[in-house]
Amino acid sequence: MSIPGIPNTNPAKPPLTPAEDKQWAFLAHCGGILGCVPSAVIYKVFKDRGPFTAQESREALNFTLPPTIVAVVLNIVGIILSAIRPGAGTPFSLLALLVWVFLTVWSVVAALRVNKNQPYRYAWNLRPIK
């Protein structure tokens, strides 16, 4: 609600231009290299401003969330085991590294497709966020 004579301090966010929409969708997939946080932030901030960004950031978030959780748990277990007995956590750390490589490869593949204005659907995606 605006009051006459007082400027609106919370203007509605304008919709994204087609170029911005593609850019944020691309960045949502690229963010998979860092886990689920970049796609979650992009989804939260831009989902109502661009349909392509909403669709692709949701897809990226759904894809990156489970492996990110798995990698964090594997690293925590690896750290705890290494504190108890040096070297015992190495297999868990290597598995976390493999998860990160998996995320990186598929995030780059998706980002390249989205950069061509083509939507991308990950083959192995649970899609818990609708």
Image: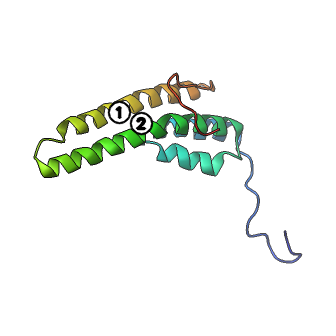
Tag 1 and tag 2, C-beta contact below 8 Å? yes
Q: How many marks?
A: 2
User: Label 1 to label 2, Cα distance in Å?
Assistant: 6 Å
**Where does the image place residue 121, in percent across and percent down from the top left?**
57, 25
The answer to which of 60 and 88 lies nearer the viewer is 88
Quadrant of residue 93 within the rendered picture = top left
Quadrant of residue 94 within the rendered picture = top left
Question: Which quadrant, please, contains the C terminus?
Answer: top right
Q: Amino acid at mark 1?
A: Val
Q: Secondary structure at mark 1?
A: helix
Q: Is residue 88 visible?
A: yes
Question: Which quadrant, please, contains the N terminus?
Answer: bottom right
- Position of 78 with respect to 115 (left or right) is left
Disc number placed over residue 67 in the picture, else none: 2
- Position of 46 with respect to 105 (left or right) is right
- Position of 126 with respect to 18 (left or right) is left
**Where does the image place residue 128, in percent across and percent down from the top left?**
58, 37
Residue designated by label 1: 99
Q: Secondary structure at mark 2?
A: helix
Q: Give the residue drawn at x 62%, y 24%.
A: 118
**Where does the image place residue 108, in percent across and percent down from the top left?**
45, 29
The answer to which of 118 and 88 lies nearer the viewer is 88
